[in-house]
Image (cartoon, rainbow, N blue to C red):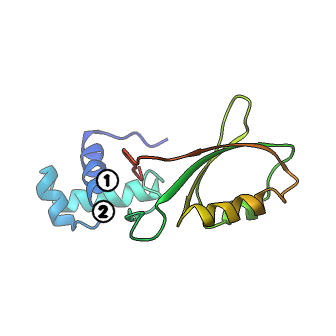
Amino acid sequence: MYELDTKDHKIINILKENSRLSIRDIAKKTRIRPSTVHLRIKKLKKNNVIEKFTLKLNNKAVKEGFIVFMYLITDKNLPDSFFKNTHIKEAFGVTGEYDILLKLKFKDISEFNDYIINLRKNEAVKKTITNVVTANIKEELN
């Protein structure tokens, strides 16, 4: 496994803030030579420390302001196609009474209701608990 050092952490922290910065800007902020920054980023990608560069959207602007966390109990493994639903933003296997925790995003309660009605048709899903988000206090990609 690739061991991160302080230079790697400095570069990662800058990329977390803004992954669109140029190598030169990252070098200025970290006080690491641009050629070193470039090589470090390449190495971080090669070693799967950095899986991909992405962006964080404004939930309301993209009409995904209705956020739900849902716990599922299943009696068998759900197919990969289940998780391809565009409303499912994150999915985790969890310990305890429930098997899966989903983070879902919807335009509004009506769209969420349509999702629930469809979910009830899935015979593999035996039980759910749903928590609707009332305030988005902190949401990160990393």
Left or right: residue 110 compared with residue 60? right
Find residue 25 and report its horizontal and vertical position in percent: 15, 63
Q: Are marks 2 and 1 in contact (CB under 8 Å)?
A: yes
Q: Which residue is mark 2?
A: 19
Left or right: residue 119 compared with residue 31? right
* Amino acid at circle 2: Ser
Cα separation between marks 2 and 1: 6 Å
Q: Is 128 in front, or is 24?
A: 128
Left or right: residue 5 compared with residue 94? left
Residue, far front:
110
Residue at 72% from the left image edge and 36% from the top image edge: 98
Find residue 82 and report its horizontal and vertical position in percent: 74, 61
Q: Secondary structure at mark 1?
A: helix
Residue at 26% from the left image edge and 39% from the top image edge: 6
Q: Is 92 in front, or is 114?
A: 114
Left or right: residue 20 compared with residue 140? left
Residue, far top:
96
Find residue 59 and report its horizontal and vertical position in percent: 42, 63
Q: Is residue 35 visible?
A: yes
Neighbourhood count class around disc 2 (C-alpha, 10 Å): few under 14, some 14–19, many 20 upward: some
Q: Secondary structure at mark 2?
A: loop
Residue at 30% from the left image edge and 59% from the top image edge: 39
Residue at 67% from the left image edge and 65% from the top image edge: 84
Neighbourhood count class around disc 1 (C-alpha, 10 Å): few under 14, some 14–19, many 20 upward: some
* Amino acid at circle 1: Lys
Q: Which residue is mark 1?
A: 16
Q: Is 121 in front, or is 37?
A: 121
